[in-house]
Image (spheres, rainbow, N blue to C red):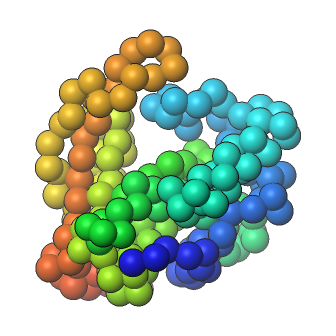
Amino acid sequence: MKPTPATLTGRLIRLEPLGPQHADDLLAAAAHDEIWTYLDEPTPRTREAIDTFISDALRDQDRSQRLPFALVDLRSGKAIGSTSYIDLRPSDRTLEIGWTWLTPGAWGTGANAEAKFLLMRHAFEVLGVGRVVIKTDLRNVRSQRAIERLGAHREGVWLNHRLLSTGRYRDSVFYSVIDSEWPSIRDKLAASFS
């Protein structure tokens, strides 16, 4: 299991390796406070802030800690958010899909579900992982429902999982899909995108 940059294309979106060419689109897409409510980052409001977001992601990629993608809307050709493979554990054949955010105009359109489907399909069928993890803030009920609609099962809550920049602890809800579950989940998700 060695995740490397790849382009994954669906019916609604294309996942492209994140890069500086996405900065203008992502700056416009990210300029909504409601996106960042449960992430430990301030709303990026300047070109410098979005450039830092991208360069931090690419630095993590260079350290084999993350594989970041831009979510590109196929109709407009514009980047509408970002997601990543994180917590890469080749020796355990596991990874997490995280750092996902989309502009609010894309919420409820199927773009996020299709992105997760494309990432899980690539993880299980190309990378050969045994487990994909998705987690969210316990307060983020909308995200929990979206993850559950994917077919991931809730494993539990880690209390005081992360200390946020505000000094408050975040409780995280963990979900997973394992390789033996993937074929039935894949078939249900693929049918929903046809």
Residue sitting nearer the eye, 62 or 27: 62
Relative to residue 176, is residue 14 drawn left or right? right
Rendering coords of residue 55 (x, y %): 73, 49
Location of residue 192 by image quarter: bottom left
Residue 172 image point, x, y percent: 29, 36
Residue at image x 33%, y 54%? 134
At 56% from the left and 76% from the top, the residue drawn is 4
The C terminus appears in which quarter of the rendering? bottom left
In the image, 87 versus 30, the foreground residue is: 87
Specify whether 77 is left or right of 71.
right
Asked where in the image residue 153 lies, by quadrant, the reply is bottom left
Q: How many marks?
A: 0
Q: Position of residue 26 (x, y in %)?
A: 73, 51
Residue at screen point 24% across, 74% down: 130
125 shown above or below 92: below
- At x 56% / y 37%, what residue is drawn? 35
Which quarter shows the N terminus? bottom left
Asked if one can make out residue 84 in the rendered structure from this viewpoint, the answer is no
Relative placement, left or right, of 118 versus 16 is left
Q: From the viewer's side, name the closer residue of 128 and 122.
A: 128
Inspect this view and state whether residue 53 appears: yes
Position of residue 49 in the picture relative to residue 14 (left or right): right
Q: Residue furthest top?
A: 167
Residue 47: x and y, percent? 85, 40
